[in-house]
């Protein structure tokens, strides 16, 4: 994608920096507070899912978990294995 002018580049840079700071600091904060919130959690990979389930209302939990699932699915579809039957048929033939 191309920017219209240098002002759009500057604005995009600040938006990206702000968004990254918000998302990464939230992830770090959840990771640091994870042991205090869920002391019996055996696998830290499930911290985000457990926190969403325990701390958010049901509808918001469903939206958050749907977002996680869609990110996983888009990653899988972007890089199918070489033995993917759909790739052999010509659907999504891009392999990584």
Image (cartoon, grey):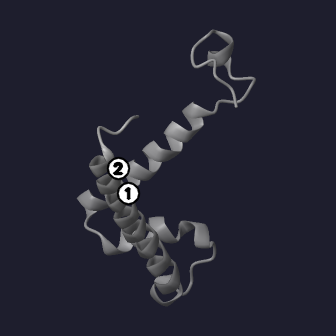
The reply to whether residue 30 is visible in this rendering is yes
Residue at the outermost front position: 6
Q: Is residue 30 above or below residue 90?
A: below
Which one is nearer the viewer's eye here, 24 or 2? Answer: 2
Quadrant into which the N terminus falls = top left
Secondary structure at numbered mark 2: helix
Question: In this picture, is 75 found above or below 83?
Answer: below
Taking the spot 37% from the left edge, 70% from the top edge, the residue there is 22
Q: Is residue 28 above or below residue 73?
A: below
Q: Can I make out residue 38 in this image?
A: no
The residue wearing badge 1 is 13
According to the picture, the residue beneath numbered tag 2 turns out to be 9
Q: Residue 95 location, x and y as percent?
A: 68, 26
- Residue ID at (29%, 55%): 11
Q: Residue 23 lies in what quarter of the image?
A: bottom left
**Crowding near pointer 1: few (<14 within 10 Å), some, many (20+)?**
few
Tag 1 and tag 2, C-beta contact below 8 Å: yes
Rendered image: mark on residue 61: none
């Amino acid at each position: 994608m191309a920017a219209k002018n240098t002002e759009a580049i500057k604005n995009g840079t600040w938006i990206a920096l702000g968004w990254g700071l918000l998302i990464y600091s939230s992830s770090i904060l959840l990771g640091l507070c994870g042991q205090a919130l869920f002391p019996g959690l055996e696998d830290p990979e499930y911290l985000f899912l457990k926190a969403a389930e325990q701390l958010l209302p049901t509808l918001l939990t469903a939206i958050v978990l749907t977002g996680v699932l869609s990110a996983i699915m888009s990653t899988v579809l972007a890089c199918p294995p070489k033995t993917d039957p759909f790739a052999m048929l010509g659907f999504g033939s891009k392999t990584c």
